[in-house]
Image (spheres, rainbow, N blue to C red):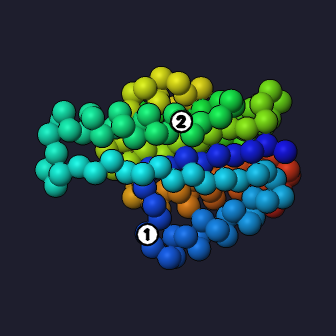
Amino acid sequence: MLTVNLIAVGKLKEDWLRRGLEEYRKRLEGYCRFRVTEIEEYRLPESPSPAQIAKGLEEEGKRILQKTGKGPLIALCVEGKELSSPQFARYLEQIQQTASEVDLVIGGSFGLWDGVKEKAALRLSVSPMTFPHQLFRVMLAEQLYRAFSISAGGRYHK
């Protein structure tokens, strides 16, 4: 069974988001081992300079890379490749043939450090739109559930 490690910067603050993520964690139990690791957000001043942002991204990126495993890394970033849900399902099927785990990484409000993106087997974008990073965790968990359901021939994906 594939282990899916969701590594995200910051903590979920809203109870409704924690409940949503927990719901999809339960749904995923039959398909994979789903783990969430929260990385401490680098504290920046209210109006950070580009240099301060770059330092924060690097610090968060180093923390992220310390938590990644031996499997492929998928970096969620706006400049990444867009996949349909069935394409994402096929991608995960391919990973399962060669690896026992995969890391999916969500950066903070300023994105991901280039060092993380460079290590990624896939840079994935779900939309050119911007989403709240905390809400996106739930959205990604739902897409994982949808992908596994597609692969299993389930009825969830219509």
Q: Position of residue 75 (x, y in %)?
A: 52, 36
Residue situated in front as seen by the camera: 151 or 135: 135
Q: Nearer the viewer, mark 2 or mark 1?
A: 2
Which image quarter is the N terminus in? Answer: top right
| Disc 1: CA contacts within 10 A as few (<14), some (14-19) or many (>=20) | few
Residue 35 placement, left or right of 55: right
Q: Which residue is mark 2?
A: 66
**Amino acid at circle 1:** Lys
Earlier sequence position, callout 2 versus callout 1 = 1
Residue 71 placement, left or right of 153: left
**Amino acid at circle 2:** Gln
Q: Position of residue 92 (x, y in %)?
A: 73, 38
The answer, for residue 98, to whether it is visible in the render is yes
In percent of the image, x 40 and y 41: which residue is there? 60
Question: Which SS class for mark 1?
Answer: loop
Q: Position of residue 84 (x, y in %)?
A: 62, 42
Q: Residue furthest top?
A: 118
Residue 126 placement, left or right of 148: left
Tag of residue 13 = 1
